[in-house]
Amino acid sequence: MDELISSRASSAPQPGGTPANRVTASGQVSGVSPLPEGPVPIGSLVFADELPDGVVVADEVGRIVVFNRVAARLTGLDPAEVTGKFVFDVLPLRDSEGRDWWVYADPYHGLPTRTRHPERSLYLADGTEILVSIGYVREDRVKGGARGSRPVKKLVISLRGAKQRERLERSRAELVSTVAHELRSPLTSVKGFTATLLNKWSRFTDDQKRVMLETVNADADRVTRLITELLDVSRIESGRMEVHRQLVDVPDRARKIIAGRVAAGDAEDRFRLDVLDGLPETWLDADKIDQILGNLVENAVRHGAGIVTIVVEPARLEGEDGNSDAVAVSVRDQGEGISPDVAPRVFRQFWRGKPRGGSRTSRHGGGTGLGLYIVKGLVEAHGGTICVRRAPGGGAEFRFTVPAGTAAA
């Protein structure tokens, strides 16, 4: 094994049979695996208790020599008590059919070509599901041994809790359910109107045909928006969101967003734009800034009430290299606002809060609950931050701050 794994929570015997004791974080005295003598390459020593996953290491006969803190938390076992015992007895792993994993996998006597077992769900004696992956450390060769014989020197077992996977699976199932629900309505409309026009074209007047075609066009736009949102979610979750910087006039982008809302039928006096002096030159992704502003304004119109105010002002943003020039944009409404206990959840996927401006439902306009999640991802892709709070005059205020950037960034 190229790296030495040492556990401060284990009591592996030291040369001469005397364990080297150390006080753990819990205040208990426990043994420490022997450290190598002589120079140790930088980065080659990894303490097992510092690893994010559970780690159990068994020697060539199956006795546990490392049982780290995370493994103890996942299994509820005391490392000091299990160290030195056989791993088969300490971790009686079974699959979903109740079969003993140690019996059918036979890690110590199986094929010598095996190097690992991919992660899979197994169960402890009390029924706790745990994600287990196994790695083999084998002898390079054995003198006098059979050709190809490479006995197991160590067995390295990685343990992870299954709750994170369950949350991910629930999230994916909810995504599929949401997509199916949101697609069903527009696609049904598109199919219905298209079939009607094809079969009974001559029976409709030109005005009736126009209404149906406009409905089909609007529903097609709705499907396109949903697909775009899903692609954005995928890019955000995979870290593949790219920012193409160019010189952007943020107040001008805000004016265009307002003009688009007015052209779509909103009252002009519903919106107000306040621009403070001293704005820095900003190099941002114009399309993504439009998307951020558009989603926040739509959210204020759909769920808020009264005048929607956009405030653009200079700001400073803390970074690794100190404070840098930035621009802050606040989108405020005059509705009921968002309670502090709900505020931390508004940027999660599928969040649909109670409408803040009256009796309208949060599904008004076909919202998927992905808009604010995407806004947060786009802001953070610029290196910025976003928060929600109570507006000065009541209502909700969504405020995001992005660094001004440079042409070369």
Image: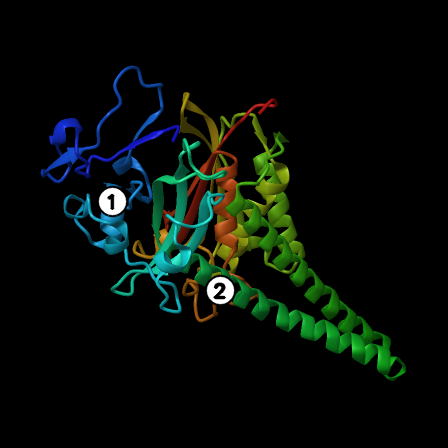
Residue 395 found in image quarter: bottom left
Identify the amino acid type marked 1: Arg
Q: Residues within 10 Å of mark 2 (few under 14, many from 20)?
A: some
Going by the image, does 221 lie left or right of 89?
Answer: right
Query: Residue 332, how many percent across, how many down?
Result: 45, 49
What is the secondary structure assignment of the residue under circle 2?
helix
Dot label at residue 104? none
Report if the CB atoms under discs 2 and 1 are less than 8 Å apart: no
Q: Please identify the quadrant where the N terminus is shown.
A: top left
What is the secondary structure assignment of the residue under circle 1?
loop
Identify the amino acid type marked 2: Glu
Query: Residue 50, how many percent across, how many down?
Result: 28, 35
Residue 167 found in image quarter: bottom left
Going by the image, does 87 lie left or right of 145?
Answer: left
* Above or below, comparing residue 41 to residue 284 in the picture: above
Which residue of the protein is positioned furthest toward the right in this rendering?
202
Q: Residue at x 24, y 44 (%)?
A: 64
Q: Residue at x 56, y 50 (%)?
A: 234
- Front label number (2 vs 1): 1
Residue indicated by mark 2: 174
Query: Residue 200, how many percent across, how many down?
Result: 85, 83
Q: Residue at x 43, y 68 (%)?
A: 358
Residue indicated by mark 1: 63
> Is residue 387 something one can see in this rendering?
no
